[in-house]
Amino acid sequence: MNSWTEVAVPNVVQVKDFPALVLTDTATSSKKALEKKRTYRMYVCGITPYDATHLGHAATYLTFDLINRYLRATGAHVSYVQNITDIDDPLLERANRDGVDWSELAQQQIDLFRSDMVHLRVIPPAHYIGAVEAIPLVVQAISELEEQSSIYPVDSDFYFSVKKDSDFGSRSNFSQAKMLEIFAERGGDPDRVGKSDPLDCLVWMSQRVNEPGWDSSLGKGRPGWHIECTAIALEYLDPSDLEETLIDIQGGGSDLIFPHHEMCAAQARVITGKELSASYVHAGMIGLDGEKMSKSKGNLVFVSRLIAEGVSPMVIRWALMSDHYRSDRMWSDDVLQEAHVAIDQLTAALAQKDCAPTEDLINSMVLALSDDLDTPLIVSQLKSWSSLTLSGAQGGNSDQLRVALDALLGLKI
């Protein structure tokens, strides 16, 4: 599957020293510095394309775009892979509800997602892989799990035995009761008769009536949710035998901590004997006017709709960076308006012939990003710089600041 248009990212030549990037690792619940390397492997879970890109999606992909930009700015190469779950129950349910072909619905929403990412200036992944095109990889991964005696049938479906991973639960750190509760809420089937353990997850679903299926050695059917990401990550990120973990960063929204990322990591460990990721990084959720934003509530705010209404994508980026990526936060008209004002002031300041000092500001931006992506601090610093500049302060180089804003924050002003 094709990714979206490449984003030109300038070099921040005036920054001589980039500290190691420190990120909060969900598995240890602590900040952890990434080892300085020439190449980083990053896998970020993509959308299920049955609805347009909402602000929760935007916040997640902006988070990993900032990570991507920082690591690139250090001179490193980032091997970035993202999947798209272009066959799954929610997609089929939506297509059935609306009386449309599921594949046409998926393609329509994938195209819209690509467009939103281009508008938001998110660096595209090197490999953008759909679940359907990854079916041969999924079948191979299931075969490798079967070699480890970790796959068993229930009727004509196949399940992964989570207890085959002795570290199961160590990435999410939830109690058994909490895992069962979340598993039931997020696509799991803990009460299915015939399973060895309530938390065992589906890896291959046999074809149901009036649903699509693909021929395989497992029978005609389609992949389970978690195994697609395991298979795609292992194939396209090409893990090195010389490193302790398979990849450097496994990322997504905090709603993926369990079961999705726990299951992916467990399957990868059983297949390879190694931990999937050095760091598990998760972005917080976005609410609207004091309520959780969700499809069931019908209160999603869509990126494409905001842009169609005339909102600048740079205003959206700024607004999402105004709070810390790990925090659950609320979206409102006030948040959007504050971002409008801030971007207008920054634009006016950058247009001045003389501006406030920029060298220390740029170095402070780098330090803030290196410390678990402290974008609220950067937002505060840029507001102060704009005010100083518009008050007549001098001694800076606005061209250098423009480059840094573009390269590090994705703000094209």
Image (cartoon, rainbow, N blue to C red):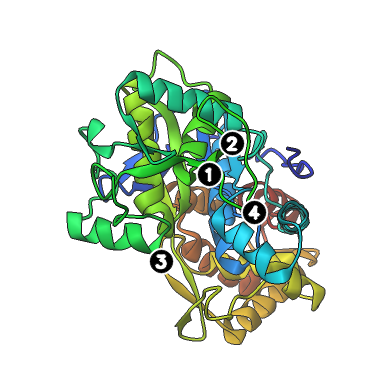
Q: Are marks 2 and 3 in contact (CB under 8 Å)?
A: no
Label 4's element? loop
Residues at marks 3 and 1, CA–CA distance in whole angstroms: 18 Å
**Residue placed at 44% from the left, 29% from the top?**
247
| Position of 274 relative to 5 (above/below) | above
Question: Where residue 210 is drawn, which disc sits there?
Answer: 4
| Residue 352 visible | yes
Question: For the residue carrying disc 4, how many other residues have a C-alpha within 10 Å: few (<14), some (14-19), or many (20+)?
Answer: few
Question: From the viewer's perspective, is 26 left or right of 254?
Answer: left
Question: From the viewer's perspective, is 32 left or right of 406?
Answer: left
- Quarter of the picture containing the N terminus is top right
Q: Are marks 2 and 1 in contact (CB under 8 Å)?
A: yes
**Furthest residue in direction top, as rendered:** 242
Type of residue at label 3? Ser
Residues at marks 4 and 3, CA–CA distance in whole angstroms: 41 Å
Residue toward you, 119 or 348: 119
Label 1's element? strand
Question: For the residue carrying disc 1, how many other residues have a C-alpha within 10 Å: few (<14), some (14-19), or many (20+)?
Answer: many
Residue highlighted by disc 1: 44
Residue 109 horizontal/vertical position (percent) = 73, 58
Mark 3 or mark 1: name the one nearer the start of the chain: 1
Residue toward you, 19 or 82: 82
**Residue placed at 56% from the left, 71% from the top?**
384
Type of residue at label 2? Val
Q: Are marks 4 and 3 in contact (CB under 8 Å)?
A: no
Residue highlighted by disc 2: 81
Question: From the viewer's perspective, is 361 left or right of 303?
Answer: left
Residue highlighted by disc 3: 327
Residue 147 horizontal/vertical position (percent) = 35, 18
Residue toward you, 144 or 233: 144
